[in-house]
Image (spheres, rainbow, N blue to C red):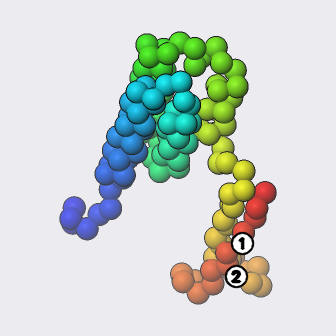
Amino acid sequence: MQAIVAEVYTLNTAFVVLVIYLLLRWEAARPSARDLLLAAFVYGLSLTHHRMILIFPPALALFLWLTDRKVFTNAGLLLKTVRDVFALPEGTARIDIGMHHPEGEGIAPYGEIISVEFDSA
């Protein structure tokens, strides 16, 4: 049974490794903030997959503090980083997928009705 059960650990590990890689790349390419912002975006994206990543911020903060303390005093960079963690960049679409019966009689039988709505807000 274990061979057919989908687990979240592989993708979660890939997100952690990608964030660490981007932070190390940012450390080597300072003062450019491109890789730091990309690491923040990947971290925010990983929050949609598994909540285990929430134990990672203290280690990230310590790494940033030991690498470059100016990150915490640069308000513009700090705001961009927070934006990339907690919100998708402008222009992305939110997709709502519903399986509701068209006559409003509750949820439709599995696979019968799927509506997809795009909201660009």
Task: Classify the position of the N terminus by image quarter.
Answer: bottom left
Q: Is residue 64 left or right of residue 91?
A: left
Q: Residue at x 64, y 25 (%)?
A: 78
Q: Which mark is residue 71?
A: none
Helix, strand or loop for disc 2: loop
Nearest the eye: 43 or 8: 43
Residue 44 to residue 119: above or below: above
Q: Which mark is residue 117?
A: 1
Q: Is residue 47 left or right of residue 63?
A: right
Identify which amino acid the numbered label 2 is placed on. Answer: His
Q: Position of residue 4 (x, y in %)?
A: 25, 68
Q: Position of residue 93 (x, y in %)?
A: 69, 61
Residue 107 appears in the picture as rendered = no
Q: Splitting the image into 4 quarters, where does residue 25 fall?
A: top left
Q: Residues within 10 Å of mark 2 (few under 14, many from 20)?
A: some
Residue 104 to residue 49: above or below: below
Helix, strand or loop for disc 1: strand
Residue 44 to residue 112: above or below: above
Nearest the eye: 106 or 44: 44
Q: Is residue 70 left or right of residue 87?
A: left
Q: Position of residue 70 (x, y in %)?
A: 57, 14
Which residue is the site of mark 2?
101
Q: Position of residue 77 (x, y in %)?
A: 64, 27
Nearest the eye: 80 or 85: 80
Residue 4 appears in the picture as rendered = yes
Q: Residue at x 72, y 69 (%)?
A: 118
Q: Residue at x 70, y 82 (%)?
A: 101
Q: Nearer the viewer, mark 1 or mark 2?
A: 1
Q: CA distance from mark 1 to mark 2?
A: 15 Å
Identify which amino acid the numbered label 1 is placed on. Answer: Glu
